[in-house]
């Protein structure tokens, strides 16, 4: 029985549930904290998309007379930074680069890591050894230090930070994909597929991919939160998004010099980073139950 069939049936053993019923069952299985996390993520995405409409003012425009306005000041709900720019507007606009620099590296690393894991798991002992030992070299370095090193070599900028984070995130994804592929190779249905003369590409696409993809999706969802934190760290160090672009990590860097005079201002973008990263992690935990990665593998 496939995972979809396990999620819900229409009352008989051989008739699958309607699509709407299956989706409803999946939503009910999602834990309440994960539903809240999903709501937070959807809200942040909508804020990023509607930034030109809902932002109170230009995120890069400011007046010296308005500098360091506190929270709740007239005209500045979340205060103003050292250049008199509205922090609320910068926070709204900053959701765009913050989400993109968190999402794009995970998408790239998931695709590349999945392919490398499949090749290593199905390609034989020598190919497995070469691929995994090369990835182990990268995996041996602390992720953030390796990202800083790559971004320093490539130069500052959002595109280079995306490349650096993608390279850093490939090894753990590839190791997960290789581990799942190796586990599947010992199962009866895989041996039957190999003995039937099916090509490795066909086996990988029809039998391995449907079983390896759910764990990768779950892991990738959690990695988005980590990637957002790493991207913010690179911007904080001047290696990611460059001024005057509004980005949460860069906002923390700009406001850190006022931590003793206006500490609440620096906490606003820092809190946004924490909330969104935690939301992705909680959602990933909930998806583990919905996708039921421990169920019987698909044939």
Image: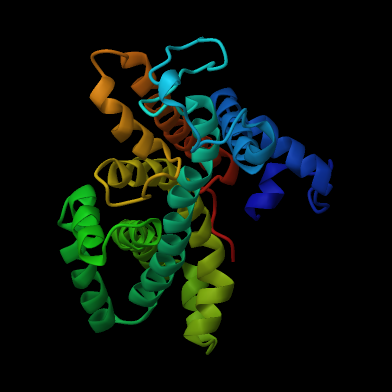
- Where's residue 30, x and y in %? 61, 32
Say if 125 sits above or below 42 in the image: below
Closer to us: 66 or 101: 66
- Where's residue 91, x and y in %? 50, 31
The answer to whether residue 6 is left or right of residue 119 is: right
Closer to us: 57 or 215: 57
Closer to us: 228 or 294: 228
At 53% across and 17% down in the image, what residue appears? 76
Count of marks, rendered view: 0
Say if 286 sits above or below 156 in the image: above
Q: Indicate the quadrant where residue 49 lies.
A: top right
Quarter in which the N terminus is drawn:
bottom right
At 21% across and 59% down in the image, what residue appears? 152
At 36% across and 38% down in the image, what residue appears? 249
The answer to whether residue 116 is left or right of residue 25 is: left
At 32% across and 14% down in the image, what residue appears? 262
Closer to us: 44 or 63: 63
- Where's residue 229, x and y in %? 35, 40
Q: Which colour scheme is used?
A: rainbow
Q: Indicate the quadrant where residue 247 lies.
A: top left
Quarter in which the C terminus is drawn:
bottom right
- Where's residue 248, x and y in %? 41, 36
């Amino acid at each position: 029985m496939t995972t979809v069939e396990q999620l819900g049936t229409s009352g008989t053993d051989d008739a699958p549930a309607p699509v709407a019923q299956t989706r409803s069952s999946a939503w009910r299985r999602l834990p309440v904290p994960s539903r809240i996390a999903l709501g937070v993520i959807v809200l942040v995405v909508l804020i990023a998309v509607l930034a030109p409409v809902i932002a109170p003012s230009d995120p890069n425009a400011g007046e010296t007379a308005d500098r360091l306005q506190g929270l709740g000041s007239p005209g500045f709900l979340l205060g103003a930074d050292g250049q008199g720019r509205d922090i609320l507007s910068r926070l709204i606009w900053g959701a765009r680069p913050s989400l993109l620099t968190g999402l794009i590296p995970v998408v790239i690393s998931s695709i590349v890591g999945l392919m490398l894991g499949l090749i290593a798991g199905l390609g034989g002992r020598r190919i497995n050894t070469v691929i995994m030992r090369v990835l182990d070299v990268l995996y041996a370095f602390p992720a953030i230090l390796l990202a800083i090193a790559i971004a320093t070599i490539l130069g500052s900028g959002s595109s280079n930070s995306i490349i650096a984070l993608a390279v850093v995130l490939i090894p753990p994804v590839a190791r997960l994909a290789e581990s799942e592929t190796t586990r599947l190779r010992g199962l009866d249905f895989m041996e039957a597929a190999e003995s039937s003369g099916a090509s490795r590409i066909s086996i990988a696409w029809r039998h391995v991919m449907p079983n390896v993809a759910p764990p990768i999706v779950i892991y990738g969802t959690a990695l988005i939160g980590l990637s957002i934190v790493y991207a913010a760290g690179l911007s904080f160090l001047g290696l990611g998004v460059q001024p005057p672009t509004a980005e949460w990590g860069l906002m923390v860097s700009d406001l850190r010099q006022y931590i003793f005079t206006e500490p609440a201002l620096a906490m606003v973008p820092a809190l946004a980073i924490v909330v969104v990263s935690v939301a992705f992690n909680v959602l990933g935990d909930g998806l583990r139950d919905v996708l039921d990665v421990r169920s019987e593998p698909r044939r």
